Amino acid sequence: MIYLDHLTTTPPLPEVVDAMQPWLREQFGAPAALHRPGLEARDAIDAARVCLAKLVNAAEPEEIIFTSSGTEAINHAVKGAALAKRRFGTHIVTTAIEHPAVLGSIAWLESQGFSSTQIGVDGEGRIDPAALGQAMTEETVLVCLHHASHDLGTIQPVAEVAKLTGARGIPLFVDTTASGGWLPVDVGQLGADLIALSPHRFGGPKGAGVLYRKSRVGVENLIHGGMQENERRAGTENVAAIVGAGVAAKQAGAALGQAAADAAKLQARLLDGIRGAVDGVQLNGPEPGDGRLPHQLSLSTEGVEGEGQALMLDLRGVAIAAGAACTTRSMRLPPALRAIGRDADLAKGTTLWSIGRDTTEDNVDRAIEQFAVVTAKLRALSPTN
């Protein structure tokens, strides 16, 4: 199988699997326990916390909170920060192309009396910081923005936004679940008060998410009933997954620049190859370069449906995603494509491609070949062609 869906999830690194094994077998103590197995588990979590803190350049390890997933980390950040500031206001500013976990959290907050403003994006999915600044009011208590778009690959001017939010004392949450482990995520340089990470997207295991919370930023707890995670998130920690997340963070930090450069070369090869082999393919988001994730492509193909392309490619040994991140099973036009003005018929033909650290030139060339064959077959079957 040629796996080109690394933005959905990545295979765990061998070092990650090896590090997790003892915590799935003989070292099974609960971190809250006072006996030796419990203390060993607690030490393992603390070591992983240090690794994640280094990856994002947190001031101290205690600013890292482990969750069950990136989605939970996003929910905790958005809901928790807004609720903590409720006495100062109930307005949130975000964009129209955020991850469903962000928009869903804001929708829940609106059911609790909050309001929100979604600012638009340009044809490549990029925001205008000035427009975001103008959307903030005296009632604004939180701004939510992604570092890089899951669906379009667009990298946002987060640091510029942070200057605006910082000047007004408004917390800034940055979703780095698509970029973490691939691009530098330095909370100081970004100016982020809160970020969410998904280690399983850079070689870690599923079952562990990461929330960074700057120490001075208030965040209400969402899960109650225990003293875990420095009293920030109740519930027995998934020690094996957290250990794996720590190892993945260490490996990602060491390979950060090289991994991105290698992926960018394959990204360009993939895009050039598809453009040369198939007519009527449009790239969503910016051209490859500094303004785009180095390992992601969103392509819309005329005269076909992306789901059909993905299913037929799967039968031919190529795994990609169709539609938009986390909304593959929905038949609605993805918000990100609507926001950039993509035609609804063309948007139906959208596929997402994402390269991993183990992807080869041969993988890319074979995927291009199969994509051309599949697209030709689907077009021949279409009654409109």
Image (cartoon, grey):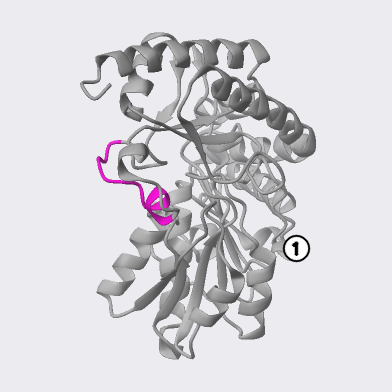
Q: Is residue 255 left or right of residue 86?
A: right
Disc 1 residue crowd, few under 14, some 14–19, many 20+, Cα 10 Å:
few
Q: Which residue is mark 1?
A: 189
Would you identify the image quadrant in which residue 195 lies?
bottom right
Residue visible at 70% across and 32% down in the picture: 264
Residue visible at 72% across and 35% down in the picture: 260
Residue range corresponding to the magenta coloring = 329-339
Where residue 34 appears, x then y in whole percent?
A: 55, 50
Would you identify the image quadrant in which residue 214 lies?
bottom right
Q: Is residue 298 left or right of residue 269?
A: left
338 falls in the magenta region: yes
Residue 236 appears anywhere in the view: no
Question: Front-most of 102 and 303?
Answer: 303
Residue visible at 36% across and 21% down in the picture: 309
Question: Front-most of 115 and 235?
Answer: 115
Where residue 47 appears, x then y in whole percent?
A: 69, 45
Question: Front-most of 267 and 137?
Answer: 267
275 falls in the magenta region: no
Q: Is residue 27 left or right of residue 349?
A: right
Quadrant including the C terminus: top left
**Residue furthest out toward the left:** 383
**Residue furthest out toward the front:** 385
Question: Front-most of 204 and 109?
Answer: 109
The kind of secondary structure element at disc 1 is: helix
How many marks on residues? 1
Residue 162 appears anywhere in the view: yes
Instruction: State whether residue 79 is above or below residue 206.
Output: below
Instruction: State whether residue 49 is above or below residue 330.
Output: below
Instruction: State whether residue 242 is above or below residue 127.
Output: above
Residue visible at 43% across and 10% down in the picture: 373
Where residue 120 appears, x then y in whole percent?
A: 46, 65
Q: Amino acid at mark 1?
A: Gln
